[in-house]
Amino acid sequence: RAAELGAERASMMAGIAQIPFIDSFDLRYRTRVVQPREIAQAVMFCIMDVSGSMDENRKDLAKRFFILLHLFLLRNYERIEIVFVSHHSNAKVVDEEQFFHSTESGGTLVSSALELTLKQIGKRFPTEQWNVYVAQASDGDNWDDDSPRCRDLLVKELLPKVQYFAYVEINDSDPQNLWAHYEEARAARGNLALGRVRERADIYPVLRELFAKKDV
């Protein structure tokens, strides 16, 4: 099994090297990722809504998004930790199997995941020793009165601690209320990027946009 996984990883790395948006030239001259400090290790928090509205197709799209971001980081760090944070109305740290395959009932409270991520950073990944990245995937559903709380958590507490925060909304309808409040957070901080994914073909263009050079 280890040999199979190793071969699969080698195949994915070979494929990712052929994609122009993460070519070495692009990374050097076109990225808008905040320049990491000279720290050899990084942690990537993967945050995903696992409530009933996130069906298997949406989870599959989210998985592809997370994998590509992970491969991007592997090109830049000697050591990378991955922390999976799943949430519905409550958030918890889970393993990869639970993250991509569990489904929970109940409402959606996105702030629970942001708060748990903050706690994990403070407890396990001090920013003077780790470069911190966060990738979040959701269908955008959230309690209306929780979305302003998410914006405030991002602007005041989480974004100042991370190198980069990438959020994708996986939804084929209009943006949800969470998107509007994340746009406000993006306006306040430069290290938050937003993208929308409707189908598999959208993932590469969205990732390219997420890491494109900002217009000055």
Image (tube, rainbow, N blue to C red):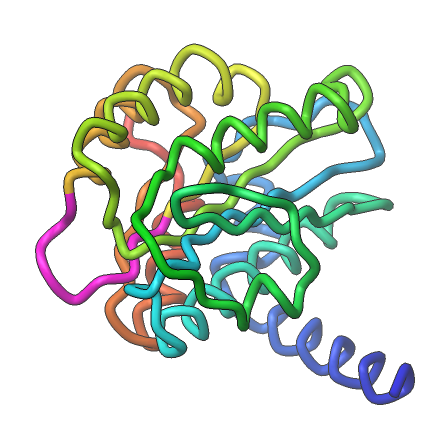
> Quadrant location of residue 41?
top right
Q: Is residue 29 above or below residue 191?
A: below
Please give the name of the residue rendered at 54% of the width and 59% of the height, measured from the top-left corner: 66
Q: Quadrant of the C terminus?
A: top left
Q: Position of residue 8 (x, y in %)?
A: 74, 83
Most distant residue in the front direction: 106
Q: Position of residue 96 (x, y in %)?
A: 67, 64
Q: Is residue 100 above or below residue 145?
A: below
**Does the magenta-highlighted stretch encompass residue 174?**
yes
**Does the magenta-highlighted stretch encompass residue 114?**
no
Count every numbered label the image shows and give the total.
Answer: 0
Q: Which residues are magenta?
A: 168-176
Q: Observer-nearest residue: 98 or 196?
A: 98
Q: Is residue 120 left or right of residue 90?
A: right
Q: Is residue 213 left or right of residue 170?
A: right
Q: Is residue 163 above or below residue 95?
A: above
Q: Is residue 203 left or right of residue 5?
A: left
Main SS of residues in magenta = loop
Q: Observer-nearest residue: 117 or 127?
A: 117
Please give the name of the residue rendered at 35% of the width and 53% of the height, measured from the top-left corner: 138
Please give the name of the residue rendered at 61% of the width and 26% of the height, measured from the top-left corner: 35
Q: Position of residue 185 (x, y in %)?
A: 30, 23
Q: Is residue 89 above or below residue 5?
A: above
